[in-house]
Image: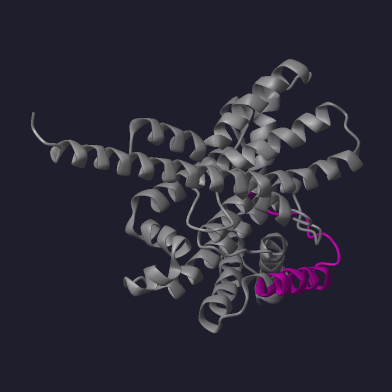
Amino acid sequence: MSKKTRVQMFLLDNLIWLIVIGFFLLNAIITPHFATYNNIVNIFYHSSIMSMLILGQGLILIIGRLDLSIESTLAFAPGVAMLLVTQWLPGGAGPVSAIILTLAVGALVGLFNGYCIGKIGVNPFLQTLSMLIMLRGLVLFLVPFSIFPLHDVYTYAGKARIFGNIPVAIPITIAIFIIFHFVIQYTPFGRFFMATGGNPKASFISGINTTRIVMYAFMLSGLLAAVAGLLYAGRQGSVNNSMGDGMVLLAFAGAILGGASLEGGKGTPMGMLGGGILLGMISNSLNLLGVGVTLVYATKGALIFVAIVLDRIKVKLRNHLMQKEQLEKILHQSKGDGESFSPSS
């Protein structure tokens, strides 16, 4: 691949960061108080929960599937965990146990989805849609009223702040994205992961246990949704049945904007972090500009549309660049062959 094509592909794959920088500079000029330190911290803080869902959805998109259940898992995991430690377990349990139970419930929900989809062969859309509805219904039944107050240890990740008045949720979110980026980009598991989404049949033939990869992906998605629930509960100091409501489609948009593709086999966690930051900046700028709630809702729909269109455009541009590169290589080889067989003077 030529240097020019490599640069073009790099810019295409990291388009989200160019959009983030451009959007930030634009709002620094036109939006009052947007570029202040406190507001930037606020953007990162309020992006942390959505970023966890974006990462979970992005991992599923990489393997060529879709997970609609993450927003309900966000509420179900902390809800069940708090009920276990406060009402259902004899003698109760401590806040650390509640954190572990929250993460375990999320992972088990994801594992169940992965088993049904990978082992039984249930359609991912229908499976996760049914879980979305079922889990939300269970949360409404089990948690009719908010559960509060929560122990300081349980709310630490979502509420506590460190030096510079930086919320703990920000370094936690960044650390999680760095870990996942390293795993996906630089480990055999990550290569199997990308291959499963890019070409599942060829991956299976080459010896990759694609069913297991699908199950792992959904388990990680459920785990990340539970982390989002932990941050959400910590931020508001309670667990209620409306947590995460309506977030799944924006998480899908953020993952697509961050470089994941409906075709599977594409995307990086750090790109998805950019998608989360962009959504946070858009929401923040609309609030600072005093845009009405109805227009904010319409903007969210427009973001989903833009994400889908951008995915198609990126796929077409990537295919065009690869075809152009192949054509130039063929022409170069043909020219070389012609010179090698030309009669000597």
Q: Quadrant of residue 98?
A: bottom right
Q: Residue 230 location in percent, x, y?
A: 65, 54
Q: Quadrant of the N terminus?
A: top left
Give the camera-side residue of 257 and 169. 257
Residue furthest top in the image: 29
Give the camera-side residue of 303 and 71. 303
Magenta-span inclusion, residue 237: no
Q: Quadrant of the C terminus?
A: top left
Residue 192 showing in the rendered view: yes
Magenta-span inclusion, residue 139: yes
Give the camera-side residue of 194 and 215. 194
**Over which residues does the magenta segment extend?**
126-153
Residue furthest left in the image: 344
Give the answer, above or below, for where 256 lies relative to 105. Answer: above
Q: Residue 187 location in percent, x, y?
A: 34, 54
Q: Residue at x 69, y 24 (%)?
A: 38
Give the answer, above or below, for where 83 lies relative to 23. Answer: below
Q: Is residue 129 left or right of residue 312?
A: right
Q: Quadrant of residue 35?
A: top right
Q: Residue 66 location in percent, x, y?
A: 62, 63
